[in-house]
Image (cartoon, rainbow, N blue to C red):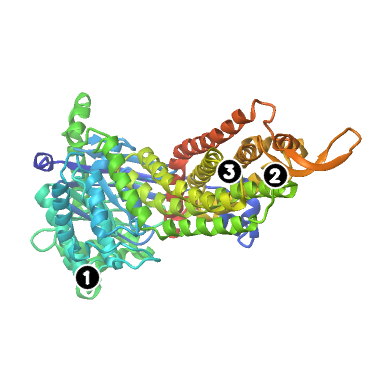
Amino acid sequence: DVDVKEKEFVLSFEDITVHVPSKSTGCLSCCSNKNSPLRHYGQEYFGMSVEQRDAFYTLDRVSGYVKSGETLLVLGKSGSGKSTLLKSICSRLNQTDELYGSVSLNGVPIGKSNQSWRRMCSYVSADDGTHSPVLTVGETFTFAAQCTSDGHSTEKEIADTVDFFLSALGLSHVKDTVVGDENLRGVSGGQKRRVTVGEMLIDPNSRVYCLDNITDGLASTDSFSLIQQISAACKKYRMAAVITLLQPSDEIVQLFDKLLVLSSKKNMSYVFICQMSSLFSILSSSTFLGQGQTAYFGPVDRGILQSVFLEEGVDAEKGDSGGIADLVMSQTTSSMEDSAISRFKTSPTNLNLTKELDAIKANAVSLNDRESVLKEFLPAEKYSTSRLYQLRIIASRRRKLIFRNSMTYARSVIAIVFGVIVGSLFAALQQDTIGALGRSGYIFLSSFLVLMLSSAVTIPDGFRQRITLFKHRDSEFYSGRMAYVVQVVMDLPLSILEATLIATISYWWVGMTPGADHFFFFLGTLIGLECVGQAFARFLCAVSRTQVSANVASSLCILLFATVGGFMPAYSTITWVLRWLSWVTPVTYAFEGMMINQFDGTTFFGLVIVDKNGTSTFGNVDGTKYLSSQSLPRSQWGTNTQIKIFDCLMLFVFAMVLDVIAMKYQESSRDWYFNKIRRSRATVAHSTEG
């Protein structure tokens, strides 16, 4: 939208301070010893952090601004808070972190968790592992373009947008190559980095880009080309970009309009904001030693850079023999940092920045008009597209993921193998008492295997997909609920296929009760168990920090389900302390329903007790009486037909309840996930104490 792109704006951030609260081990104090086995088990299997951490400030009163059409470069050593600053600006900080200060658009403060602002301010993290590896580069861009379109764009318009960004990022020749990962060969590391950038840049609603270390892994020429293209796009379409880089060359630095340098000194940070002139000029600002002073820009040449970053008496030719990045980073040693701060404190540009920030606030609209001003810039809707459109494009993407996942075909093979093995194990059963016991075992084993298989294969896929889901949700691509609904619906056909293969191969082979009604009830019960297993796996993916912990919990719970399922031991022999578990165990309902389906109204040859004295003889055994001897949990609730229908329906109720809970707690796992990866060890070591 040309009209929107041409609106001028200024993004300012003033006194940005991020405080990370302390963390104690609490009840896990027994695991604080680094050599404790419980510590290692907790970290490996449950993703638990048992390290004690003092509170610290990762940013301390950092101020600056960037105007539409400009690019701002952020430099600093590892642990100086570069990524934290970007996340503070674009409202993507961890919820446990405490943010102080303000981020403003044309002098109007933006809320700390404004969803419309997150749509306008795109963020690219330093992590590359957030793509679906089986999708091609073109498909990745197409999905992003669809999510950020208005929902009415034609396929040609989407394709033209994708081709434009592929060409701009130098990815046209790998359009049909899968992105790949450590297990699937795809594009190179540098190309994947550009895919990460392009996926966020393609959003037409974005006017501010926060790009974290986007040239990592790129060749020098590719890095220069990428920054050059971003800088040109910002000037042409009146956008703004805040970019962090590691040791950029002079050629790259001079592509930026402003430079911001963060100090890595403990408990403080200071900033230099630079503006390039014909050769190179600098605007600088500072927050230091807790005083929170910042500077506005003014034209400064390299000589002023030297006056700030070089020690007094140091020859410029000797002290500034490297690149610009080397010069401005030389102050990060503790002995030189204080003197650099002192020299900068007295620089005219420090005062200029303070005046400029004051002017931005003074020129801001009145309090009553602020909402209308923000509405002019921020997207009006929470998402670019309707829920129906989201369902369609997410389903299309999910279909590709399913058919390109080798596990999809492996699951069918596994189902056939299980069907053959189980069927052959019980193939020799006769229509007698021993055969009845064997068929009871077949029913139980089928229930257990289907539940275990469906859960085991769903967990790995769930953890692979949730990383990409969190990235898309943070960028407001689509509703997380829509993505969850699509996953449930799209996984259902595979559940039906697995259950059908197992039932078709083994049911007739074992010699179960003939008749289409009996077979389809057996099949429907297995499908219900498949749904429960997948829903249970999705629930574990939502509430577990790691895949290992989800796998462990799945195995333990399914074994518990089998133990109290009613086959061994029978329901009546289970101690009253554990008997209640039979009522919340899906295996119990499946076993009971299929037992009634098999034996109700049938007869088989066996030992029959004919009188009260225990006299017995061989003859036909009534299947209904055999069911009574099994003491099934709900045998007194109604007729056998009513009970087995209730049991089958309860399986689908279990699945729906688990999915509703999982959908709710999916956002909690997002916090856990980003808690785990968001901050480097270097910053965790900082403390506000002594």
- Is residue 16 visible to us here? yes
Q: CA distance from mark 2 to mark 1?
A: 67 Å
Q: Nearer the viewer, mark 2 or mark 3?
A: 3
Visible residue check, residue 244: no
Find residue 542 and report its horizontal and vertical position in percent: 48, 44
> Looking at this rendering, what residue extends furthest in the right direction?
613
Residue 299 at x, y = what percent? 12, 55
Q: Give x and y (percent) for residue 113.
A: 34, 37
Q: Amino acid at mark 2?
A: Phe
| Precedes in sequence: disc 2 or disc 1 | 1
* Secondary structure of the residue carrying numbered label 3: loop
Which of the labelled discs sits on residue 567, or is there none? 2
Residue 31: image location, x then y, percent: 63, 54
581, above or below 449, in the image: above
Residue indicated by mark 3:
514
Considering only order in the chain, which callout, 3 or 2, is on the residue closer to the N terminus? 3
